[in-house]
Amino acid sequence: MTSNLINQKKTLFIKLLYIFSILTLTISNPISAQLAPAPGRDSTERNNPIEPFHIIDNVYYVGKTLHNPSYLFTNDEGHILIDTTFEEYVPDIQANVEKLGFNVRDIKIILSSHAHHDHVGGHALMKEVTGASMVAHEADAEIIESGGVADFREGDPWHEAKVDRFIGDQEEIKLGDTILTAHFTPGHTKGCTTWSAEVEDEGKKYDLVLICGLRMDANSPLVGNPKYPEMPQAFAYSFAVAKTLPVDVFLGAHGYWFNLAEKIEMLKDNPEVNPFIDPEGYYRIIDGWERAYLERLKKER
Ligand SMILES: [Zn+2]
Ligand SMILES: [Zn+2]
């Protein structure tokens, strides 16, 4: 089979998958799901430092605030860090790692959800401190290495960091017995990467998904964007992918997406039940993001 034909078949499959997903969405969710708004500039969620904590198995929250998560996947052979958030948060993230009893120098790999300032702004400094290697999807690597200048949407630049290795769709990162799988879910950035892993709790296995975010930018056009003309198709593809992922443990690149504040309280009240096992929460936000996307598509076309 020629590669062209394979591509055509792949595109057709994705289209069918997407049409099917819209149909099931309409049938199963007649009431529009309300998405929580992003916390405001002066909110405690954005500004107050929080204590690091254990999420599940070898996964820990080491982000400075509720709004800006950093995740540590620990292992005897070294740790993997996903998202460094802002450069000025790096010392807090390091302190959080140490507070949990781990050594920052044992961070061997730095990954990202997507190449925006609030997720990768600390990559350069964290790389310097840890000596870790940096792995990213090629499309986001270009943005990370340009300090944000190569992004299709404009924002404050950050210190550029060198990406050591590219990772493709469905490829795995292995460190000891930690395995993270990359799922290419473009749209929010051109290389937005959702990560999945299998984790264990009390002898049971769970699918963990860390969604990179399928939100559109409010300030730039979705359709006919000269810097990203294929954005509508990218989002459609990513919604289809996001819906086919098996999910038990739901994490994301911002805390309010998965009700982090509430879940921390739930964990304190009842440590026996892990609130991060929340597949409904995951599918609810994917549905909500997709509704917003379909509405914008209708308006702009
Ligand atoms: Zn972003
Ligand atoms: Zn963000």
Image (cartoon, rainbow, N blue to C red):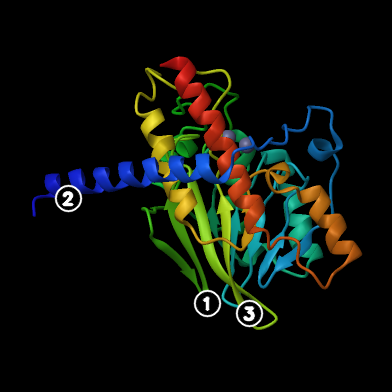
Furthest-right residue in view? 269
The residue at which mark 2 appears reads as 6
The secondary structure type at the circle numbered 1 is loop
Identity of the amino acid at label 2? Ile
Asked whether residue 120 appears in the rendered view, the answer is: no
The residue at which mark 3 appears reads as 204
Question: In the picture shown, does residue 177 fall above or below 29?
Answer: below
> Which numbered mark, 2 or 1, is in the foreground of this view?
2
The secondary structure type at the circle numbered 2 is helix
Q: If you read the primary sequence from the N terminus, does the residue marked by circle 3 or circle 2 appear first?
A: 2
Question: In the picture shown, does residue 27 fall above or below 61?
Answer: above
Place of residue 139 in the rendered image (x, y in percent of width and height, measured from the top left) = 39, 39
Q: CA distance from mark 2 to mark 1?
A: 34 Å
Give the image quarter of residue 268: bottom right
Quadrant of image for the C terminus: top left
Q: If you read the primary sequence from the N terminus, does the residue marked by circle 1 or circle 3 appear first?
A: 1
In the image, 115 versus 289, the foreground residue is 289
Q: Residues within 10 Å of mark 3 (few under 14, many from 20)?
A: few
- The residue sitting at 66% across, 71% down in the picture is 58
Place of residue 287 in the rendered image (x, y in percent of width and height, measured from the top left) = 56, 41
Cβ atoms at labels 1 and 3 below 8 Å apart: no
Q: Residues within 10 Å of mark 1 (few under 14, many from 20)?
A: few
Give the image quarter of residue 38: top right
Q: CA distance from mark 3 to mark 2?
A: 38 Å
Q: Residues within 10 Å of mark 2 (few under 14, many from 20)?
A: few
The residue at which mark 1 appears reads as 177
Q: If you read the primary sequence from the N terminus, does the residue marked by circle 2 or circle 1 appear first?
A: 2
- The residue sitting at 73% across, 50% down in the picture is 63
